[in-house]
Image (cartoon, rainbow, N blue to C red):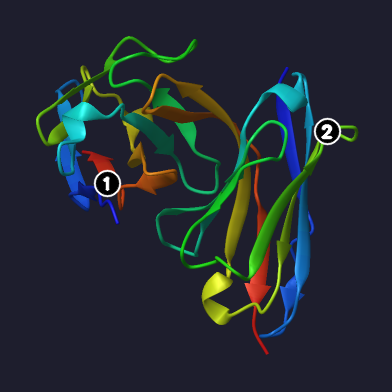
Amino acid sequence: SYELTQAPSVSVSPGQTASITCSGNRLGSKYVCWYQQKPGQSPVLVIYEDKMRPSGIPERFSGSNSGNTATLTISGTQALDEADYFCQAWDSNTVVFGGGTKLTVL
Amino acid sequence: EVQLVESGGVLVQPGGSLRLSCVASGFTFSTYWMNWVRQAPGKGLEWVANIKQDGSQTYYADSVKGRFTISRDDAKNALNLQMNSLRAEDTAVYFCARVIRSGNTGYHLDYWGQGTLVTVSS
């Protein structure tokens, strides 16, 4: 079965750029999306189709996907961006999630 | 405004059964694929099952195949999940979510419910 791998945690200073990666075999040939989840809340879609932002998502969120790695980039990271981030792809009629990355802003 | 409201989560004994429901509003429910995703306490997201607009296609995670059944009632704007032979490892918050599909590989969940907690324990 297809697998997506994420680092468990990433730290960033306020105002700096955070990069969260998601790796999988030939991931660049699939669309990837990203969800943000804060404690006790439902996930929120922040990027879809590799780089598209849903309405209401700040421009500081961007995405890319090439080769075996997709990247979620948060520019000018703010304290309110501290959350868990999950990547997701679709493969062989199944939905695959990465294990999630906890972003700490300190 | 799109809304998804899950219900049915309770404490159930191992081996027991449970039926979850998700009522949708604010969009034409019958025209969307729908999805169940779960999250065990302190863990990541795990896809459970999905169902096509007309119910003609359903897919399941290996961990629930043969035990769970996803269904929909478009007249009631409802998505259901029948859960049988429950195990301790099925303990999780269960979310329903609306699916957007694009091209051959595009698949994302643009709206999520608030989730309902299922606890399997004796």
> What residue occupies the far front of the structure in this picture?
B56
Quickly name the residue at label 2.
B74
Judge whether A13 appears above or below B56 on screen. Answer: above
Q: How many marks?
A: 2
Task: Where is residue B59? Give x, y as percent.
Answer: 55, 50
Residue A74 place in picture, x, y as percent: 24, 23
Q: Which quarter of the figure is the N terminus of chain B placed in?
A: top right
In the picture, measured across the screen, residue A88 lies left or right of residue B58, that is: left
Q: On screen, A94 above or below B19?
A: above
User: Which three-letter amino acid code belongs to the residue tagged 1?
Assistant: Thr
Residue depicted at 63% across the width and 70% down the height: B67
Left or right of B61 on screen, residue B32: right
| Mark 1, residue position | A101
Task: Tell me the residue at 49%/10% (across/down).
Answer: A55
**Above/below status of B57 relative to A17:** below
| Distance CA(mark 2)–CA(mark 1) | 36 Å
Q: Quadrant of residue A76?
A: top left
* Element under disc 2: loop
Q: State the residue lying farthest toward the right.
A: B75
Identify the residue shown where x is 73% and y is 28%: B3
Q: Please tell me in which quadrant of the rendered image residue B119 appears.
A: bottom right
Which amino acid lies under the numbered mark 2 shown in the image of this protein? Asp
Looking at the rendered structure, the secondary structure element under dot 1 is strand
Give the image location of residue B30, x and y in percent.
Answer: 76, 26
Nearest the viewer among A84 and A31 is A31
Q: Is residue A50 visible?
A: yes
Q: Both on one chain, marks 2 and 1?
A: no
Q: Chain of mark 2?
A: B
